[in-house]
Amino acid sequence: MAHRTLALAPSDEDSDAKGSFGMPRRQFLTFCGALAVAMGLPRSAGAQVATAIAIARRPSVIWLQFQECTGCTESLLRAEHPTLEKLILDVISLDYHETLMAAAGHQAEAARVAAMAANKGKYVLVVEGAIPSKENGIYCKVGGRTAIDIVKECAADAAAVIAIGSCASWGGMPSTSPNPTGASSVAEILGKPVLTIPGCPPNPYNFLTTVVHFLTFGKLPELDAKGRPKFAYGRLIHENCERRAHFDAGRFAIQFGDEGHRQGWCLYKLGCKGPETYANCPSILFGDVGTGSWPVGTGHPCIGCTEQGIGFQKPIHALAELLTVTPPTQFARPAEPQGVGATFASAASVAAVAGVAIGIGAKIASNLGKHEDKP
Ligand code: FSX
Ligand code: SF4
Ligand code: F3S
């Protein structure tokens, strides 16, 4: 895959963003309509989104990496279809990114300082990875300076701060007990809330949609109490899951590889944390490889990677807390064969919820040109 060459040219001098990203105009407009729907707006707002993307100055982005596995960056760039990373790298001007930039050592540090000076008060700071706070932060240093120093310096003149991935959002895997380095979230280090896009790794569409919202409306999207965009984290996975009808009908896989597992039944009894995890994974899918491309879709229980206190904390086999369960008015017999006997209530709710939500994912994926559409 060809990466964009990182440059320090002022972001508003680049004309790449004025095109329609290699898509025919009509396909681009349809794609923007899908992005608008993903933001919780009417599809008709797609025209406004398209105009904003086409004429907006690409915001300068300073992307820092600390205690992490680079999975956030990988998920952004490893989409099979080239359009996704092209879109992301065309709507932002990625002016500092240690993994992707050609510069190294002092040159790289100079690039960061120069980009921040050139875009003072206007750049978006994206932080990937947790920040160690024990022993004055000595467990993570870049260029001889602690991650604490760097993130504070970079946040001071940023227009917006985005914590990408669970590590930056709430500490993630590095913060699990006994947390020897004192791994902390960006918000904890800065002492103020920031926008968070949790997930290990996070879904790149949620980053793209957040940036597009910023470009279209000049402000960040509406957030929940944990700093997460409501358009992406406003509903439980359990509400959008394509296996929900099996949950409501009492059809569960009990062991990996058993008949229920092979039939695609609900994974709740294998420890699926979908009932207590807020994320849109089943709706927007991962990797542009088609339907079922998300953890539960592949037959693995959701581990709640977006949720503090659940992902990497709660054992995979432990049963999820059922946060919102509205029982259907009638239940199918647990022994009912797959696809037969689902209740009217469960079938209707799955049709309504999954139809809309999965439709968005399918639409986005198909608009990127590679997807076997659901019937
Ligand atoms: Fe890795 Fe990112 Fe997980 Fe963390 O994603 S995929 S450990 S959330 O910071 O690189
Ligand atoms: Fe889907 Fe998991 Fe809920 Fe079952 S428990 S319906 S697999 S999210
Ligand atoms: Fe994570 Fe669960 Fe989604 S494990 S990727 S929140 S399905």
Image: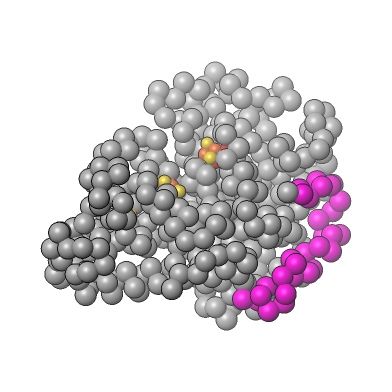
Q: Is residue 289 visible?
A: yes
Residue drawn at (45%, 69%) of the image:
374
Q: Residue 34: image x %, image y %?
A: 56, 71
Residue drawn at (39%, 35%) of the image:
312
Q: Is residue 170 left or right of residue 212?
A: left
Instruction: Provide the residue span drawn in magenta.
Output: 2-30
Q: Could you say which is closer to the camera, residue 289 or residue 110?
A: 289
Looking at the rendering, in which quadrant would you find the C terminus? bottom left
Q: Is residue 279 visible?
A: no
Q: Is residue 9 left or right of residue 212?
A: right
Residue drawn at (26%, 39%) of the image:
318
Q: Residue 335: image x %, image y %?
A: 15, 59
Q: Is residue 32 left or right of residue 86?
A: left
Q: Is residue 218 above or below residue 168?
A: below
> Is 12 one of the magenta-colored residues?
yes
Q: Could you say which is closer to the camera, residue 256 or residue 250?
A: 256
Q: Is residue 365 above or below residue 182?
A: below
Q: Could you say which is closer to the camera, residue 349 or residue 208?
A: 349
Q: Residue 57: image x %, image y %?
A: 77, 63
Indicate the quadrant of ligand 2 in the picture: bottom left
> Is 125 one of the magenta-colored residues?
no
